[in-house]
Image (cartoon, coloured by chain):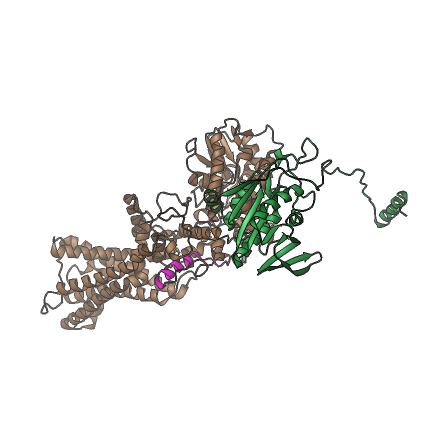
């Protein structure tokens, strides 16, 4: 019986154009639409698969945000047993160090055997959540995992390396795993099931108190990449283009 | 004076013949009813309850139209004539026997001219029957169409019913040969056959003896037919009419019902026999195995695992051979997903079987189980999140209208006469925005007071519902109703026949009451009739028109688009499968969102080939945005770019203005 905790967060949905807030250091939340971090979605799927395969209990922890309720109910409809929402001053976005401390605080109480979370997210500005949580919980961490099986006190995790290499590693529990992809793609949950969950499931709301963002990076300036000027199109046949290239290299002092 | 002779030539020395006849017939009828009851009781013992007892007068009307007059059967000439020749003859024989019984026991009226007419009609129908039976033999043993079930059971039934009629004819002729009454001509067939017996010169006693033999044989065959009826292919003579009687009344063809519920209010998603309602089980037993549905089915024609006939028969087989699991066993998910919800099966079925409702019920089960393919899952997820299947922000919904001057009114902000429900494809598909713009320009040019909902519009949910995602359908309906309730308008006009169907038939009356819904082709037709839309050019193209399923079969709109096309000065050449027989493009019911799967020929390609066969037709006119996409692709993949161009009807209108 494994006690699995999934850490999930909502991230900006890139379907909408991103705007920078007046402060110039963060995204403008007003125009932002949030969506579950895709990797967290895979982590959730992996947790449910583990539960279905070898039993256990799945608890999902998510920070409060617009749409977090719905996200939690959707995960419950997939088969999660317990839903926890962290309440605190997350409003204007916080760094992952603060979030990971909050996650770790809530997870510690649950004495998890296995903590799963997405290996990365599109708003990770100061490292990803997984290793930080592992650090705060004093557990080991392996990232880029795409498949987990539990056997007693250990799990076997498949880690993907660039270039198509895959390693199977045995990890002693308790541990935190950063999920790159679940064994199966996230399943579809019928809306009626989610709506049913809204009526029957309860979300356990936990105050996190003061957030501690120390150790994380502070954003100085956030801006849309500036379009580079002075692109020159080289025209003509191969000879001409090559000659012009050499010229440019010379001008730039490269040759 | 012609008089009816009762039990002519039947010896009375064993007691009155009617005693035997009635005893045998009552016993046979009893056995038949008992066996029928045993079969039928499975419907309500296993099936879920469903209310189908309301509006009995309408149901009686259905019974008369479909079981007695048999209008659906008659939709196809050869099998239609064949079947009514047989069925109507039996109705007449049945009535004739009943009248004879009345005459014998209650009220004598069969004498003189009445008797002559009576005899003549019965005799004439003997010939009608024989023609029908002959056609059936030819069809079954020579033509052998693929759609038919060619099994021994059907041969047996045909043999029995033919023997019964021949038995009647032979007894009649033998009696006439002996009696040779002056009015023998009133039974022309019997009298003609009698000549044969007369020519043989057999004695009266011999002929009377033969008569007795044939009479007894006739009686026994009738008894056997009755006794075996509930387990034979003739069962449809009972279940067919019942099915017509209990067919769906309140909801129009285009409206589905939500999932049925258990007494405690839990929805029932159909995966096994006992999840079906008794009516859906009756559907299984009512199937005549005629295969009309299968022949009309685009999914079957494309070589997918779906045959609507097979699907219905799997229900019957499961019911009578205890295989209770349906989905995943007798009915494959791939078959269920292959349905385009074109409605051709329902439209063709002579006994009004409701294939589509059952298919959607089973799809609901698959959706609840999360058993949907990746592409459909993406589409549904997008629809749930953004209200469109394209996965784009709702803020982009009206981007196509950029540059149109004056800016199109926002129906959510100011009152309009026509609220234009643009639909997903017309709004988001980059290849269709030009056409959508033309629609807007046409509307503006005729001075229509119209507006759109901008980001307030969501997918109508028509095909979401048909894909089996009822919860999402409800959610989309709620969102749209909210936007509609906020708006002030007189009429809704849609680009898409699918939205049209949902808004017209499935949306409940909203806060503004139920406002009329028009398809843009209907609106244009009205504007032409009222003189508001006038053309300056006569296009003179030779075109063909494809009836979209959800406009044609679902809602009976066939003429409005044709009138508009003709008003632009184009000549319409019809494809062989047109109007209510139009062949689906293959996109409906969520198919456009799913992986295509294996197919021998795409329905859209088959359709384009059909159009190209037509003489000198240059334009393939459609009235559904999905059709533009589907057929433009099919023209390319079939290599017909040089011969035919796919155009939306609005393009003709735009050009002719
Ligand atoms: S609705 Fe159309 S595609 Fe579906 S089974 Fe009937 S005929 Fe076939
Ligand atoms: S379902 Fe209807 S159309 Fe299809 S084979 Fe049966 S009776 Fe014929």
Colour applied to chain B? brown
Magenta-colored stretch includes residue B318 = yes
The x and y percentages for residue B363 are 46, 52
- The spot of residue B426 in percent (x, y) is 56, 40
Which quarter of the rendering shows the C terminus of chain B? top right
Q: Choose between B471 and B308: the one closer to the eye.
A: B471
Asked which quadrant contains residue A220, the reply is top right
Quarter of the image with the N terminus of chain B is bottom left
Q: Relative to A243, does residue A209 appear above or below in the rendering? A: above
* Total marks in image: 0
Depth check: give the residue in front, B358 or B104.
B358
Q: Position of residue A239 (x, y in %)?
A: 86, 49
Residue B159 lies in magenta, yes or no? Answer: no
**Residue farthest along the top direction in this orientation:** B414
Q: Is residue A49 left or right of residue B277?
A: right
Chain A display color: green
Q: Position of residue A153 (x, y in %)?
A: 59, 60
Q: Is residue B543 left or right of residue A177?
A: left
Q: In the rendered structure, which segment of residues is drawn in magenta?
A: B303-324
A165 or A57: which is nearer to us?
A: A57
Majority secondary structure in the magenta region = helix
Residue B186 appears in view? yes
In this view, the residue in front, B136 or B121, is B136
Q: Is residue B541 visible?
A: no
């Amino acid at each position: 019986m494994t006690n699995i905790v999934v850490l999930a967060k909502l991230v900006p949905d890139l379907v909408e154009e991103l705007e920078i807030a007046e402060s110039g250091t963060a995204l403008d939340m007003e125009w932002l639409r949030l969506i579950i971090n895709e990797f967290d979605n895979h982590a959730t799927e992996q947790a449910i698969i583990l539960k279905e395969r070898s039993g256990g209990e799945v608890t999902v922890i998510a920070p409060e945000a617009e749409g977090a309720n719905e996200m939690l109910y959707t995960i419950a409809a997939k088969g999660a047993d317990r839903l926890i929402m962290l309440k605190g001053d997350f409003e204007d976005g916080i760094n992952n160090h603060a979030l990971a401390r909050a996650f770790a605080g809530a997870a510690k109480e649950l004495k998890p055997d296995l903590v799963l979370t997405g290996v990365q997210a599109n708003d990770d500005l100061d490292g990803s959540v997984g290793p930080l949580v592992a650090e705060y919980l004093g557990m080991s961490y392996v990232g880029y995992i795409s498949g987990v099986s539990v056997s007693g006190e250990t799990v076997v995790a498949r880690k993907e390396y660039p270039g198509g290499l895959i390693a199977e590693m045995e990890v002693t529990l308790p541990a935190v795993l950063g999920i790159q992809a679940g064994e199966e793609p996230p399943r579809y949950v019928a809306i009626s099931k989610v709506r049913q969950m809204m009526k029957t499931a309860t979300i356990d709301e936990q105050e996190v108190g003061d957030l501690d963002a120390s150790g994380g990076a502070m954003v100085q300036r956030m801006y849309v990449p500036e379009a580079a000027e002075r692109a020159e199109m080289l025209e003509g046949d191969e000879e001409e283009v090559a000659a012009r290239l050499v010229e440019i290299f010379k001008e730039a002092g490269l040759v | 004076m012609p008089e009816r002779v009762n039990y002519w030539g039947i010896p009375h020395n064993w007691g009155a013949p009617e005693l035997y006849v009635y005893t045998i017939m009552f016993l046979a009828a009893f056995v038949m009813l008992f066996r029928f009851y045993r079969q039928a009781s499975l419907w309500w013992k296993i099936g879920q309850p469903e209310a189908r007892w309301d509006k009995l007068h309408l149901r009686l009307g259905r019974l008369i139209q479909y079981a007695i007059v048999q209008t659906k059967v008659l939709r196809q000439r050869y099998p239609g004539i064949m079947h009514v020749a047989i069925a109507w003859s039996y109705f007449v024989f049945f009535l004739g026997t009943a009248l004879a019984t009345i005459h014998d026991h209650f009220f004598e009226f069969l004498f003189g001219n009445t008797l002559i007419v009576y005899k003549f009609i019965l005799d004439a129908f003997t010939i009608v029957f024989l023609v029908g039976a002959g056609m059936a033999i030819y069809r079954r043993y020579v033509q052998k169409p693929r759609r038919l079930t060619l099994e021994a059971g059907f041969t047996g039934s045909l043999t029995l019913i033919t023997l019964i009629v021949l038995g009647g004819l032979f007894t009649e002729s033998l009696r006439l040969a002996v009696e040779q009454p002056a009015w023998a001509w009133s039974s022309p067939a019997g009298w003609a056959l009698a000549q044969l017996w007369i020519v043989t010169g057999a004695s009266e006693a011999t002929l009377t003896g033969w008569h007795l033999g044939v009479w007894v044989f006739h009686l026994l065959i009738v008894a056997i037919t009755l006794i075996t009826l509930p387990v034979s292919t003739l069962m449809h003579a009972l279940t067919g009419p019942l099915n017509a009687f209990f067919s769906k009344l309140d909801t129009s063809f285009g409206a589905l019902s939500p999932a049925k519920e258990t007494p405690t209010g839990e929805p029932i998603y159909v995966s096994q026999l006992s999840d079906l309602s008794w009516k859906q089980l009756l559907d299984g037993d009512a199937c005549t195995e005629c295969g009309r549905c299968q022949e009309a089915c685009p999914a079957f024609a494309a070589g997918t695992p779906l045959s609507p006939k097979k699907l219905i028969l799997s229900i019957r087989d499961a019911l009578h051979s205890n295989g209770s699991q349906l989905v995943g066993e007798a009915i494959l998910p791939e078959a269920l997903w292959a349905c385009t919800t074109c409605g051709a099966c329902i439209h063709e079925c002579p006994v009004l079987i409701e294939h589509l409702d059952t298919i959607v019920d089973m799809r609901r089960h698959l959706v609840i189980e999360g058993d949907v393919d990746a592409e459909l899952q993406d589409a549904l997820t997008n629809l749930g999140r953004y209200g469109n299947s394209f996965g784009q922000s709702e803020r982009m919904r009206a981007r196509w209208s950029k540059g149109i001057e004056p800016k199109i009114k926002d129906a959510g902000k100011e009152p309009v006469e026509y609220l234009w429900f643009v639909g997903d494809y017309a709004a988001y598909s980059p290849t269709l925005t030009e056409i959508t713009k033309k629609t807007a320009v046409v509307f503006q040019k005729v001075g229509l007071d119209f507006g759109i909902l901008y980001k307030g519009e969501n997918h109508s949910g028509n095909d979401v519902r048909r894909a089996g995602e009822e919860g999402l359908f409800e959610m989309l309906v709620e969102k749209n109703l909210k936007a509609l309730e906020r708006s002030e308008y007189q009429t809704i006009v849609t680009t898409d026949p699918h939205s049209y169907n949902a808004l017209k038939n499935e949306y409940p009356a909203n806060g503004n009451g139920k406002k009329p819904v028009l398809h843009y082709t209907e609106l244009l037709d009205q504007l032409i009739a009222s003189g508001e839309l006038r053309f300056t050019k006569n296009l003179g193209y030779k075109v063909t028109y494809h009836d979209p399923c959800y406009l044609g079969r679902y809602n009976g709109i066939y003429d409005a688009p044709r009138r508009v096309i003709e008003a632009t000065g184009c000549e319409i050449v019809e494809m062989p499968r047109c109007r209510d027989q139009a062949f689906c493009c293959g996109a409906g019911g969520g198919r456009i969102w799913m992986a295509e799967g294996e197919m021998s020929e795409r329905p859209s390609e088959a359709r384009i080939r059909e159009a190209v066969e037509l003489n000198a037709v240059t334009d393939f006119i459609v009235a559904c945005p999905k059709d533009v996409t589907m057929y433009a692709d099919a023209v390319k993949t079939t290599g017909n770019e040089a011969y035919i161009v796919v155009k939306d009807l609005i393009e003709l209108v735009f050009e002719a203005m």
